[in-house]
């Protein structure tokens, strides 16, 4: 397990490098932010490139993990499909090839022959990242790779990634939107039960290097299985209870906002972009709970941060299921699971967290918000 964790930290850092390169290298950046003008083909091409950054990152992670853990290869899923249609209507399967040159040649076919952009991307994909430090001592979990599956969101909060607003972050405070909301999320679940057991979160754009070296990121990880609970984020110190704080999507339903406004003071009812970022805010203790009443997140959004919350003694529940339950307390029956598709739905919706969700660190806070929302939804 320590091997797998180290590998995931490394591929997440590589993914963050690709995400940074797409913004830092002019030929790629232009593709990312180009105005949607011109004919349909041009519009389609720009759209393609935005998806391509996601697809390439996901395939790179799939390639690297599958190479080291062949037993997991068929169980590495993600948001994107690797079948890609370029602006000319041609269908290309995006894969990571054995050499940088081959990958560049393949990417050039997707990028309508733009060899400069293709080479830059291929270079980032084939470059080994700096070693990622993680103290994994004592992580002896008796699970074999053949029991595990993976969910990847190569870039969560894509819209913030594309808009690219640079915010000065204030220590200990949640910042609602900007580049820092974009995250690489890699979650590991148990195939038999769907429990999330390991998660890696990489935040590629945390701060600018004061010496002019571009963006620097951060990473977080957690493992929760069979009595082992380890997380790179520390448990909060028991301090005075300063009242409930909640983070929501700005598009949350008014009835939910109204119900929560009765529980929290106005500065503790916060809004932020990115499903992953909002769960990270709960992990870091910047908010007590993240509530979402819609089915607008997917397994790849929640799996990784869910594992960290479990390692911290919290979790992520299905809101609809939890509202229907009568008993309080830490009961795992409403926790989200990651192994079974919703057969009533089609396409990506099969993997939606359809009943909405609540992410929490402390079960008593979960119970408070559930009580406040009962009968309102
Ligand atoms: C999105 C992204 C959005 C979020 C949405 C996710 O993933 O995290 O920001 O909406 O639920 O599916 P909101 O910001 O309103 O919470 P992606 O960017 O990967 O499509
Ligand atoms: Ca997402
Ligand atoms: Ca995404």
Image (cartoon, grey):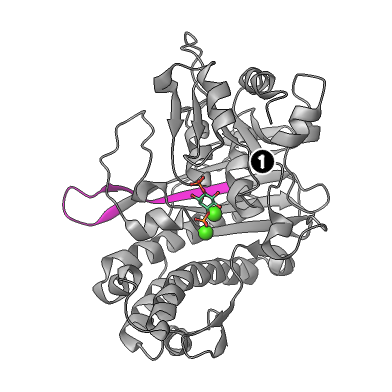
Provide residue 77's location: percent of width, then percent of height. Answer: 66, 63
Residue for point 68% across, 26% down:
376
Provide residue 347's location: percent of width, then percent of height. Answer: 71, 66
Residue 311 can be seen, yes or no: no
Q: Quadrant of the C terminus?
A: top right
Residue 10 can be seen, yes or no: yes
* 6, 198: nearer the viewer: 198
Quadrant hosting residue 268 = top left
Q: In this image, 24 relative to 203: left or right?
A: left
Q: Is residue 47 magenta?
A: no
Provide residue 191's location: percent of width, then percent of height. Answer: 79, 54
* 327, 74: nearer the viewer: 327
The reply to whether the residue tagged 1 has its Cβ within 8 angstroms of ligand 1 is no
Q: Residue furthest left?
A: 211
Q: Is residue 207 magenta?
A: yes
Q: Residue furthest top?
A: 240
Mark 1 crowd level (few <14, some 14–19, many ≥20, 10 Å Cα): many
Q: In this image, 99 relative to 175: left or right?
A: right
What secondary structure predominates along the stretch shown in magenta? strand
Please determine whether, in this image, residue 90 is positioned above or below residue 162. below
Marker count (numbered): 1
Q: In this image, 209 relative to 225: left or right?
A: left
Q: In this image, 102 relative to 217: left or right?
A: right
Residue for point 40% across, 66% down:
18
Quadrant hosting residue 230 = top right
Please determine whether, in this image, residue 47 is positioned above or below residue 293. below
Which residue corresponds to mark 1?
Answer: 356
Element at label 1: loop
Q: Which residues are magenta?
A: 199-215
Residue for point 67% across, 62% down:
348
């Amino acid at each position: 397990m320590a091997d797998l964790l180290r590998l995931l930290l490394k591929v997440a850092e590589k993914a963050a490098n690709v995400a940074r390169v797409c913004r830092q290298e002019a030929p790629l950046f232009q593709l990312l932010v180009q105005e949607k003008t011109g004919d349909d083909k041009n519009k389609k091409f720009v759209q393609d490139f935005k998806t391509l950054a996601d697809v390439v990152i996901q395939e790179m992670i799939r390639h690297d993990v599958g190479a080291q853990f062949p037993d997991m290869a068929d169980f590495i899923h993600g948001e994107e499909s690797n079948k890609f249609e370029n602006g000319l209507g041609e269908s290309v399967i995006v894969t990571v090839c054995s050499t940088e040159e081959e990958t560049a040649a393949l990417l050039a076919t997707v990028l309508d022959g733009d060899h400069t952009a293709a080479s830059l991307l291929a270079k980032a994909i084939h470059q080994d990242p700096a070693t990622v430090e993680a103290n994994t001592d004592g992580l002896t979990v008796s699970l074999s790779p053949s029991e595990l599956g993976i969910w990847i969101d190569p870039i969560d909060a894509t819209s913030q990634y594309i808009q690219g607003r640079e915010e000065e972050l204030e220590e200990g405070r949640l910042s609602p939107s900007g580049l820092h909301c974009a995250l690489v999320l890699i979650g590991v679940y148990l195939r038999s039960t769907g429990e999330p057991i390991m998660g890696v979160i990489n935040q590629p754009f945390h701060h600018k290097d004061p010496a002019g070296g571009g963006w620097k990121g951060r990473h977080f990880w957690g493992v929760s299985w069979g009595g082992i609970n380890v997380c790179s984020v520390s448990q909060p110190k028991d301090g005075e209870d300063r009242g409930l704080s909640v983070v929501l999507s700005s598009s949350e339903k008014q009835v939910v906002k109204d119900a929560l406004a009765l529980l929290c003071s106005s500065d503790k009812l916060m809004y932020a972009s990115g499903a992953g970022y909002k769960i990270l805010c709960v992990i870091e203790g910047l908010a007590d709970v993240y509530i979402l009443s819609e089915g607008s997140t997917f397994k790849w959004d929640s799996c990784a941060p869910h594992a960290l919350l479990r390692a911290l003694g919290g979790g992520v529940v299905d809101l609809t299921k939890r509202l229907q339950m009568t008993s309080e307390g830490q009961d795992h029956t409403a926790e989200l699971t990651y192994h079974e598709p919703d057969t009533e739905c089609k396409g990506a919706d099969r993997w939606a967290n359809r009943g909405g969700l609540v992410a929490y660190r402390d079960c008593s806070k979960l119970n408070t918000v559930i009580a406040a929302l009962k009968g309102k939804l």
